[in-house]
Image (tube, coloured by chain):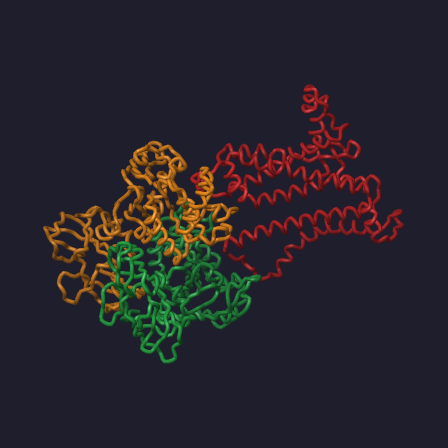
Amino acid sequence: MQLSLEHVGKTVGPAVHLYPQSLSLAPGAVTVLLGATQAGKTSLMRVMAGLDVATTGRVLVDGVDVTRMSVRQRNVAMVYQQFVNYPSMTVAQNIASPMRLRGDRDVDQRVRDIAARLHIDMFLDRLPAELSGGQQQRVALARALAKQAPLMLFDEPLVNLDYKLREELREELTQLFAAGESTVVYATTEPGEALLLGGYTAVMDAGELLQYGPTAEVFHHPQSIRVARAFSDPPMNLMAAESVAGGVRVQGGDIWPVPLPAEAPKRLTLGLRAGGLRVTQRPGDVALPGRVELAEIAGSDTFVHVHTGVGELVAQLTGVHVCPLGDPITLYLQPDSLFVFDAEGPLVRAPARPGRAH
Amino acid sequence: MARIELDLAHAYKPNPTRDEDYALLPLKMAFEDGGAYALLGPSGCGKTTMLNIISGLLVPSQGTVTFDGRDVTRQSPQQRNIAQVFQFPVIYDTMTVAQNLAFPLKNRKVPEAEIKAQVGRIAEMLEMSHQLDMRAAGLSADQKQKISLGRGLVRSDVSAVLFDEPLTVIDPHLKWQLRRKLKQIHHELKLTLIYVTHDQVEALTFADEVVVMTRGRAVQVGAAEALFERPAHTFVGHFIGSPGMNFLPAASVRGGLVVLGQPLALTDGHVLPEGPLKLGIRPEYLALGQAGEPNTLPATVTRVQDIGTYVMVTCEAGEHRLKCRLAPEAAAPVAGDTVHLRVLGEHTCFYKDEALIS
Amino acid sequence: MSTTTKPVNQKAWFLVLPVIVCVAFSAILPLMTVVNYSVQDVLSPDRRVFVGTEWFAAVMRDEELHLALWRQIQFSLAVLLVEIPLGIALALSMPAQGWKSSAVLVLVALSLLIPWNVVGTIWQIFGRADIGLLGYYLQQAGMEYSYTGNSTHAWWTVLAMDVWHWTPLVALLAFAGLRSIPDAYYQAASIDGASKWAVFRYIQLPKMRGVLMIAVLLRFMDSFMIYTEPFVLTGGGPGNATTFLSQYLTTKAVGQFDLGPAAAFSLIYFLIILLFCFVLYNWMQSLGTSEKEQGHG
């Protein structure tokens, strides 16, 4: 089903929860709503579901205006952060509830199938309160899948689970999404999760929709500094600079040979994700001498916080690097791989994508 | 600052007989003065129980807790002079930030001038100096957590600071700043810090030594590198790393190694005991070889994902799913390709009955 | 974060119709009757004269009414000053969990279940010097005590009766408020070395703010309208030392059959209570939203 939002906005009293925004979801695919808490993700999902009526704009399903249609008449399934299940019904009854409401046949067999797919078939006779958090969320997921609604909404469903459990469920969810035909909308605050889920991403910030497109595209081609900030973990390194003949001049006076389009503005902000900084030099690199402020070893990667002439930078180095505090260190980067933004925000130039993988 | 030693077990029932009766299986552990430790594990592993025993909120059913040689097993947290930061920010709503920070000192009748100086120092360290006169109730979650932390740090004779999953309610990009802050504070004040979490990145970046726990048992204690390179237990291999270690069933037959029915030649002079084994190799070290290369395992690629800083390749060998991390510049296969995995190398670990064979 | 704005469903009005009819019959019609009487002078069942606001003016000038109003305000204030702290103290000392908690809750709530005129009768007998426990022992101790003869004694007795009857309500509300405070706060306070008083002042009292506001509102409204208990206990005496507003109104309406002024007065009474409640309620709401806004800062 094709869900479109046209200039949808939501204002409650004096507070603007959603600024007018238009969005056409790719049918049958996963769309990730990425943004910090209070960015408007939940508000947008509620408007999509029909739980809230948009103050301005229209919601269209397959071309039909459903803005005022109540949620009961729309065919939507929703999964929340807080493992919402019917507490007095067993797991089997929970999963069966949407099917029974529709008057389906063959309910028991389908309940068993879905429970097996989500690995909760041994709990069918238990009450949700007797299960662990992860299992309760699986029951909620099973119930949503049982409904086979053309639109499925997930509001940060894994955020209350353990890290490892989150990874496992995310893996299973991606397979379930791929196997089904529903349009899925998934809200999250973690950029990593958006990348792992793939599909499309809509980046939101403070009630505004900043960018929508295939996830890898939005990641490698953020249209503004705000999108780059929202879609980077660890945070993107930003450096102030100005355009000069031959490239850009950064703080400290150095001139880097960054290719700029003809009408580039004067004041710029350069962006580089932590993975773009290295400690080994390659031909064409510029060098950034600095001092180690902090080194964090995270298993397979080391995050080094360095104080340099152009500001505080974070570098993500593969492998374990022991960097004592206060030691001098030189970081290297390829000027070609820098994002160039107008100091006001919009993207001026994005680097070419390394390799091509999806 | 104190050296903390644990020699205890904890069971909820009076006469525990089997492993399941214990919340914490008998253990002996020492936390050095001034060290930063993390207790890492999934929910229900006993990490919060251990933290509560260290802090004095819980008395172990058997055994002792000593601080610098003194038996403090039955002493309250106040008597042990520890500080604790909880999952949800705990602040006194009616007071300002300065009053919140001064509260523990006021209760100990510390002179006014000293209180002011100490509060000023801690506020500076936490970067909250300009917010001292604001009402604590009006601040954001991460600032409230900083106040909770500050209340613990403001007492100069605190024996240890304990953290119970303190970053749970914090946004991802603010988590970075808080983690950095914690590390800097550790560096400056040299306090004994013990941190409970289920997030391995938090644990590894924060702590000098991590205690990995599962089901009431501490399975490995070590620095990040050791846990990553040489996990002593398959659980550690699985839990640490994102994604965790790949495991394949293997067998040592008459001095030769057979993996998934294929004989492979052992390099590096590994001597393996006879019988069924598990081969473990991390996605970061699983390399793709050429077609026809000897000593490789064939597998079919099912998924290739662009995760920004790396490319994740999921492939299947028989019924086993393996994941492999490739650098973004490397040539990535596409779904459906056959790849040849180099599963043997210096980073490969072998396990018998879940324990590492060294 | 936000509440659901449900789309309007017209069919719901039909379900509410029976309730509307009942309420109309039992409340709105009688109220309209009162309004009717308040603007007329009923000389005899067939002769009625429209007098406009004359009754209202007369009521406002009535000396007796002013005195009764003053007594009423004093009483309500005294009730709040005694019952709220006492209720909180009671809630703090009640056990939190287990069978003891349920047992104590039942015991505490007993006085709330007694019909109000029975409460008055209990205390009436209680205070008598010849057969009442209180009256008898006070007399044995050599103290002068007569709630029928001495105004001050009558006041104290009425106050004591109200405290005995209604403090458990405040206690129950405060108890519920206390139970909602997460353990982490107490743990943090003990780690910070806070004394019991500090814990009360900085953690328990602020977190009970919501329920205490409800308790204050309820107790104020109820005490302002109090009728049965003091009527049964003292009959408003001695003299009119304990004649509060509602009793004065009833005397006027039923006793003297001055329907006009009585109706006018009851409307004014109604509006006074409405005004107080409106002010208190808005104040409560503003406190609640200001906390919420700060919380999401």
Residue A268 is left or right of residue C73, and the answer is left
Residue A72: percent from left, percent from top: 52, 61
- Farthest left residue? B254
Residue B219: percent from left, percent from top: 26, 44
| Colour in which chain C is drawn | red
Judge whether residue B303 can be spotted in this image.
no
Residue C183: percent from left, percent from top: 46, 41
Viewer-nearest residue: C109 or C235: C235
Residue found 36% across the figure and 38% down from its top: B53
Residue A257: percent from left, percent from top: 30, 74
Relative to B131, is A200 above or below?
Answer: below
Residue found 13% across the figure and 49% down from its top: B272
Viewer-nearest residue: B175 or A261: A261
Q: Quadrant of residue B11?
A: top left
| Colour in which chain A is drawn | green
Q: Which chain is orange?
A: B
| Label tally | 0
Judge whether residue C242 can be spotted in this image.
yes
Q: Quadrant of residue A99?
A: bottom left
- Farthest front residue? B113
